[in-house]
Every structure is written in structure tokens, then in C-alpha cells.
Amino acid sequence: MKNIAVFASGSGSNFQAILDAVQRGELEANISLLVCDKPGAYVTERANEAGIPAFVYCVKDYPSKADYEVEITSLLKSNKVDLIVLAGYMRLIGPTLLKEYEGRIVNIHPSLLPAFPGKDAIGQALAAKANWSGVTIHFVDEGMDTGPIIVQERVRIATEDTKESLQRKIQVSEHKLYPEILQMLLTRGEVEQDEKTRAY
Ligand code: GAR
């Protein structure tokens, strides 16, 4: 069974959805650990409750982002992590981590990329008066929400939608889609350490 590490900064509803899917046997993976960059984030409570080791690192405690990522990389390697799953991790992955895990880092973003990248994608979609938004799951590269897209799901924006109501709709889609796609990636041999066997 493959080992995954979830990276998150916030409430962790996606972390919870992944955990629930593992516990139901729908996602055949071992959640080795949680990496969180925000002390006190609710996601760490969810991990504690489930008995999953939670590691909180603050980038400002390190001389550089590279040093911060060196420490995280060594944690991942010592836990034999196969796949990094970003679930509301609000920080760009730097070259240090990317070099070690390229092709083995996935992210979920609450818009139909390339539309509305970066922070507050839901607010951006509402401000643009878009009729549709949605969810994108993609491999991570050095850019901001720019890596190869694995899957997208559309979500209709109603005229009466607020940030809260649209976020709820998008998260319903995220919570179903992310575990399904992780299961597909992990069981179809698309997450391999050997570069030659990668799917793209
Ligand atoms: C999710 O909606 C995720 O798509 C988004 O943060 C939210 C985290 O919610 N990620 C991004 O915006 C990344 N650019 P959660 O903490 O409840 O899982």
C-alpha cells in the first residue's frame, strides 16, 4: 500500500474526506502524516483525533524556504512517502521539495484552471460574474496552479450565490472527487518513483 502525506493550512475538510475514504476502504492508501504550515489550524485537530501524526512547520522559523523544505523532505523520506497530497496548502512548493517529488505532488484548486488561480478563487469567480466555476485536480509544478491537469468538474454558479454557498457547493464536489482521483492514481501505477514509468 502506498504512503501519502497530506499538506494543509486550514480547516482540513478535504483531509477529512480523504481520511473517511481510507477508513471506508474506498481509498487504498496509508495516510502517513499531515504537514501543516499554520499553528493552530483546525486540520491538526482532525489529525490528532484520527491518530495521524501531525507536523507543524513555520517557514519563518527557518533561515530560508529551502531550509524549511529540506526538513520536510527528510521527514517525508524517512516515512517513505510516495505521494504528496496538497489539500488547502496555501503555499507554493519550492524547488527543494519539487526536485525530490516531481510528478508525485498533486493539488486541488477551487476553480476551473487556468481561470482564477491563486488565493480566493471563489471570490474571484463571483467578482467576475462567472456562470460556472468548479474544481481542478492537477500535478504540481513550479508555477502557481499551473501543473498538468488530471481532472476538472464544473459547478454552476447561481445568481444568488454568496462566497459561502459557492464554497459549500465546490467542497461537495472536492470531497467526492479528490479521494476518487487519488485511488485512481495510486492503483493504476501512475505514482512511481521511477521517472520512466510516470504517466506523463
Ligand atoms: C479547498 O477548497 C481547496 O480547494 C482550496 O482550499 C480549500 C481548503 O479547504 N485550495 C486552494 O485554494 C489552493 N490554491 P479545507 O481546508 O476545508 O480542505
Image (cartoon, helix red, strand yellow):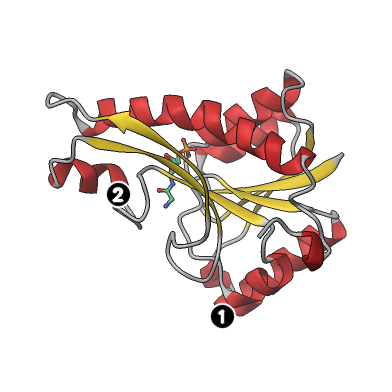
Towards the viewer: 195 or 41: 195
Towards the viewer: 132 or 77: 132
Q: Quadrant of ligand 1?
A: top left
Residue 31 seen from this side: no
The answer to which image quadrant residue 177 occupies is: top right
Q: Is mark 1 within 8 Å of ligand 1?
A: no
Q: For mark 1, give the secondary structure.
A: loop
Towards the viewer: 187 or 18: 187
Q: Is mark 2 within 8 Å of ligand 1?
A: yes
Answer left or right for 163 relative to 5. Answer: left
Residue tagged by mark 1? 64
Question: Where, quadrant-wise, is the N terminus in this rendering?
Answer: top right
The answer to which image quadrant residue 94 occupies is: bottom right
The relative height of residue 3 versus residue 105 in the rendered view (above or below) is above
> In the image, what residue occupies the spot 73% across and 29% down?
27
Which labelled disc corresponds to residue 114?
A: none
Which labelled disc corresponds to residue 120?
A: 2
Residue 138's x, y, as percent? 53, 51
The relative height of residue 17 versus residue 184 in the rendered view (above or below) is above
> In the image, what residue occupies the spot 60% across and 76% down?
95
| Disc 2 residue type (three-letter) | Asp
Question: Where, quadrant-wise, is the C terminus in this rendering?
Answer: bottom right
Pointers 2 and 1 in contact (CB under 8 A)? no
Residue 116's x, y, as percent? 29, 53
Disc 2 packing (10 Å; few <14; some 14–19; many ≥20): few
The relative height of residue 105 versus residue 155 in the rendered view (above or below) is below
